[in-house]
Image (spheres, rainbow, N blue to C red):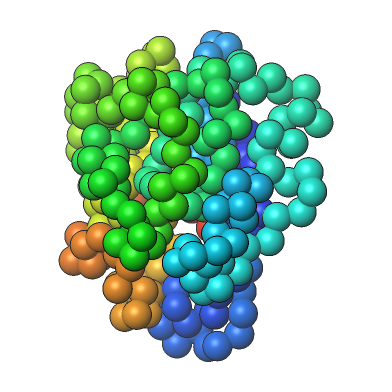
């Protein structure tokens, strides 16, 4: 079965009521999480978290607002490149980096993986590719974080084999089989939060794990259906679709053999 190793690569801060109505105005930390997935020696990285490139490309101009609105904290040694070096994990051993969506806290380390291919939603890439300046900022996208040869190394999940999901993954019914995963990793669209936003069902020895990315920010969003602030909807790709996805996540949480992980919840 697939193996998953969680990582945290920095964090940002914001007031609590932005991610959950009624949570107050105290400042909370939101970790930038990533996961290393392995099936029989084949490795994928799910997102990259923050890296030094984020601070480099948000120091000036309009993208400085990104750093101002969600201050980022990344200590020395916290980037995935540094953590992998400490653990003896060669960057070249990561065959693919899977991009859940193109917000800066999920793609900041892409340039470190010069030997890896990329996997993402075609809709997501085609949406952000032409964006610059204010329009990119509004989508949480920093164009300079994308490697120059990105399009030569990317594959789109829409091109993968589609499959029907097991009943215990209801209400989700269909997904895309990740190549070389022996059907142990299934990618699924999670529309709403960002264009082309995706998650993944991963079959492990303990049962199914669901990487839900930013389909919710905290567990209470989907367990108790406590919604984010209306202001948060201003940066969503499709607020109505977001709430539909949140309701699906709520239903999934009742499945006894599925463990749900979010990209920014404080505890894993």
Residue that extends furthest to the front in the rendered view of this protein: 61
Total labels: the figure holds: 0
Q: Position of residue 73 (x, y in %)?
A: 68, 61
Up the image or down, 122 lies above or below 241; here it is above
Q: Residue 52 at x, y = what percent?
A: 65, 47
x and y, in percent, of residue 7 in the image:
64, 42
Q: Residue at x 55, y 88 (%)?
A: 25
84 sits to left or right of 31? right
Residue 222 visible at all? no
> Of 196 and 220, which appears nearest the observer?
196
At 31% from the left and 80% from the top, the residue drawn is 230
Residue 20 occupies which quadrant of the picture? bottom left
Q: Work out whether residue 91 can be spotted.
A: yes
Q: Nearer the viewer, residue 42 or 95?
A: 95
Q: Residue at x 49, y 71 (%)?
A: 65
Left or right, residue 81 beside residue 177: right
- Above or below for 116 versus 234: above
Q: Is residue 67 left or right of residue 176?
A: right
Q: Residue at x 55, y 34 (%)?
A: 111
Q: Is residue 75 above or below residue 169?
A: below
- Between 257 and 233, the residue placed more toward the observer is 233
Where residue 31 sits in the image (x, y, percent)? 61, 57
């Amino acid at each position: 079965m697939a193996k998953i190793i969680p990582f945290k690569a920095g964090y940002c801060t914001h007031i609590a009521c932005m991610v959950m109505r009624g949570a107050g105005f105290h400042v909370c930390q939101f970790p930038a999480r990533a996961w290393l997935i392995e099936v029989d020696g084949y490795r994928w990285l799910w997102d990259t978290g923050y890296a030094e490139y984020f601070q480099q490309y948000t120091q000036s101009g309009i993208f400085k607002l990104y750093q101002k609105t969600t201050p980022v904290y990344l200590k020395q040694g916290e980037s995935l490149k540094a953590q992998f070096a400490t653990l003896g994990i060669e960057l070249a051993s990561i065959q693919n980096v899977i991009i859940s969506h193109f917000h800066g806290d999920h793609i900041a380390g892409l340039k470190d993986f010069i030997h890896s291919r990329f996997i993402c939603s075609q809709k997501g890439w085609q949406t952000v590719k032409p964006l610059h300046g204010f329009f990119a900022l509004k989508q949480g996208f920093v164009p300079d974080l994308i490697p120059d040869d990105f399009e030569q190394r990317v594959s789109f999940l829409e091109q993968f084999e589609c499959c029907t999901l097991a009943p215990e993954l209801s209400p989700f019914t269909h997904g895309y089989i990740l190549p070389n995963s022996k059907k142990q990793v299934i990618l699924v669209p999670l529309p709403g939060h960002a264009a082309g936003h995706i998650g993944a069902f991963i079959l492990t020895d303990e049962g199914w794990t669901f990487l839900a990315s930013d389909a919710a920010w905290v567990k209470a969003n989907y367990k108790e259906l406590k919604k984010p602030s209306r202001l948060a909807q201003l940066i969503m790709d499709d607020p109505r679709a977001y709430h539909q996805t949140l309701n699906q996540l709520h239903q999934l949480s009742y499945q006894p053999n599925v463990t749900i992980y979010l990209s920014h919840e404080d505890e894993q």
